[in-house]
Amino acid sequence: MSSILTNSSAMVALQTLNMVNKGLNDTQNRVSTGLQVSSGKDNAAYFAISSTMKGDSSMYKAVNEGLTSTKNSIATARTGAERVQDYAQQFVERVSFAQANGVDLGEVQSELDDLVANIQSTIDQSTFNGDDLVGGAVAAQTVVTGVTRAGGTFAATSITFNSVDLQTIQDNLEAIDLENLDADGVNDGDNNPGSLDEALRLAEAELGNAIAASTSLGVSEKSIEDQQEFLGMLTDTIDSGVSGMIDANMESEAARLQAYQVQQQLATQSLSMANQAPQNILSLFR
């Protein structure tokens, strides 16, 4: 039955066109944004999870940047400690040379004083952005390495390393005075070694301390580098996971876009044809 009051065919064609237009608009949005899930209405669960994961990824990247500053501080301190180690080795060598007969201890002492001055200069310069890890007492240094949500609880993770005390090494080497050895060969506690043998033993001990300091800083620097490498891999994994959840498949969207465009053309033509039906009724009255 045909009616001039109700055009059922046009209503159906219009509904079809509206559905096609909506699908086309949604597809165009996914193509333009590259996102399949751009808000909670698209997929509430994926949107919530991806938002949390993107937040974690941003925090990891920020932590990684902060670790770069820490690594630079440790690297600067390690470089200084290794230089002090070199000076301490030279110090030991000059004290060993002083063991020979006929050596002018005054001249050797002058060389030792220069080495001690170089050590102090190295200590003073071995800071990065005001961060001194070599000039004071050994102290634990804590640095944030990331975040964790284990057990449903958010918390920061951290590692601890120790600063080193190069100043004490310098002070102890400075106290070795070959021109004022105790006459009886016994150290009386006046900062002077009791003998050349004692002076060599003390210098060797400080060389050992310098080696231990540079080694400790080297281990700490490697730990920071390893953590940064892990954070880099972790953020890549998280970003890939988020991408898999919310990014649009551009190949599929391109094919879908073309299909919707064809459907839109057909739906428009169907609506136009349906709208012509009432005009056909007029021919019955001619």
Image (cartoon, helix red, strand yellow):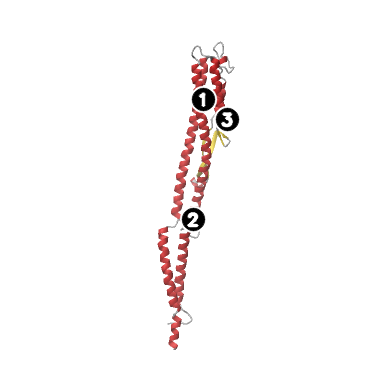
The CA span between labels 2 and 3 is 53 Å
In the picture of the structure, the residue carrying the numbered disc 3 is 124
The first of marks 1 and 2 along the sequence is 2
In the picture of the structure, the residue carrying the numbered disc 1 is 87
Which amino acid lies under the numbered mark 3 shown in the image of this protein? Asp
Residue 250: which disc? none
**Disc 2 + disc 3, Cβ < 8 Å:** no
Identify the residue shown where x is 47% and y is 65%: 25
Identify the residue shown where x is 47% and y is 47%: 235
Locate residue 255, reporting x and y percent.
Answer: 40, 62
Q: Tell me which corner region of the image, top left, top right, bottom left or bottom right, holds residue 182.
A: top right
Q: Secondary structure at mark 1?
A: helix
Residue 97 appears in the figure = yes
Residue 137 appears in the figure = no
Q: Tell me which corner region of the image, top left, top right, bottom left or bottom right, holds residue 139.
A: top right
Residue 47: which disc? 2
Camera-side mark, 1 or 2: 1
Judge the density around disc 1: few (<14), some (14-19), many (≥20) Cα neighbours within 10 Å. Answer: many
- The quadrant of the image that shows the C terminus is bottom left
Locate residue 120, reporting x and y percent.
Answer: 57, 27
Q: Secondary structure at mark 3?
A: helix
Pick out the residue farthest to the bottom. 286
Judge the density around disc 3: few (<14), some (14-19), many (≥20) Cα neighbours within 10 Å. Answer: some
Which amino acid lies under the numbered mark 2 shown in the image of this protein? Phe
Pick out the residue farthest to the top. 184
The CA span between labels 1 and 2 is 60 Å
Q: Secondary structure at mark 2?
A: helix
